[in-house]
Image (tube, rainbow, N blue to C red):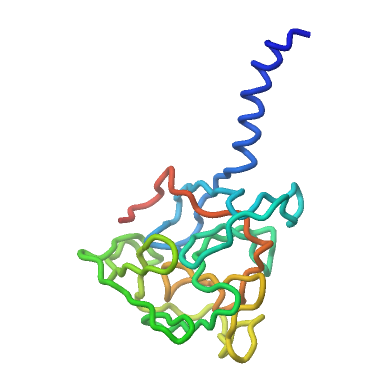
Amino acid sequence: MNWRIFGGVAAPVLALVSARCSIENFKIPSGGMAPTLVPGDHIFVNKVVYGPRWPSSRKRAWTGSAPRRGEAIAFEWPKEPDKIFIMRIVGVAGDNISVTDDGMAINGKKIALSPVSGGCKFDDEDGPRDFPCFEERLDAPPYHVVYGKPHDDPEPRAACPPGMDAGCLVPKASVFVLGDNRNNSYDSRYWGPVPIDHIVGRLIGVWYRGKKSP
């Protein structure tokens, strides 16, 4: 065998396999992450940043970075693990989370919201609309959120979400996630925290825009 030829063929094949294992494309189906992500957006997700998972398993080959507040992640929805959701981490293990129709508090501290000049425009279920938009900053780089008029709740909300104790604390090895479209997102407020081993990866960015967004 000519090892030079083998090496020349194997290298790009391994590079493609490595890229496929470390980065994956997802399409955004709904507006719960608007204005950051809107329906039709195609995004890339880094699947190794928190530690790569073995194929067909939630066990990680090694431990990577710890998930941080403010990071947008792809994860297997705890209620139906075959579905992948994209949302933003706002709480980690031990955090007390309180979310209202006009803001959020973590461990009793109100999170500051800075108005964005000009607001945000994107399509929701009523068509293209302008929304008051705010910059929010946690432990990761800042991002934009919308606190618009809430739609009807998809289901009743308990004082503390499922999987959290009476103190509304995020349990061990879990994160609490919200959509950036805060009053119109079906997220941890309704079905509880996301176990860390359900996390697929962290949002890298948008490579194709669907509908109009800021």
Q: In this view, which residue lies farthest toward the right?
A: 1
In the picture provided, is 124 more to the left or to the right than 117?
right
Q: In the displayed structure, does residue 134 sit left or right of residue 159?
A: left
Does residue 175 appear to the left or right of 88 in the view shown? right
Image quadrant for the N terminus? Answer: top right
The answer to which image quadrant residue 138 occupies is: bottom left
Residue at x-position 61% and y-position 58%: 84
State whether residue 23 is above or below residue 194: above
Residue drawn 61% across the image and 77% down it: 192
Q: Farthest top residue?
A: 2
Q: Is residue 36 above or below residue 206?
A: below
At horizontal 66% and vertical 29% (from top left) the residue drawn is: 14
Q: Would you say 136 lies left or right of 197 here?
A: left
From this view, report whether residue 101 is shown above or below residue 175: below
Q: Position of residue 209 (x, y in %)?
A: 39, 47
Q: Position of residue 88 (x, y in %)?
A: 49, 65
Q: Quadrant of residue 194?
A: bottom right
Location of the C terminus by quadrant is bottom left
> Could you tell me how many numbered marks the image carries?
0
The answer to which quarter of the image holds residue 78 is bottom right
- Residue 50 location in percent, x, y? 61, 55
Residue 81 image point, x, y percent: 69, 62
The residue located at (32%, 74%) in the rendering is 113
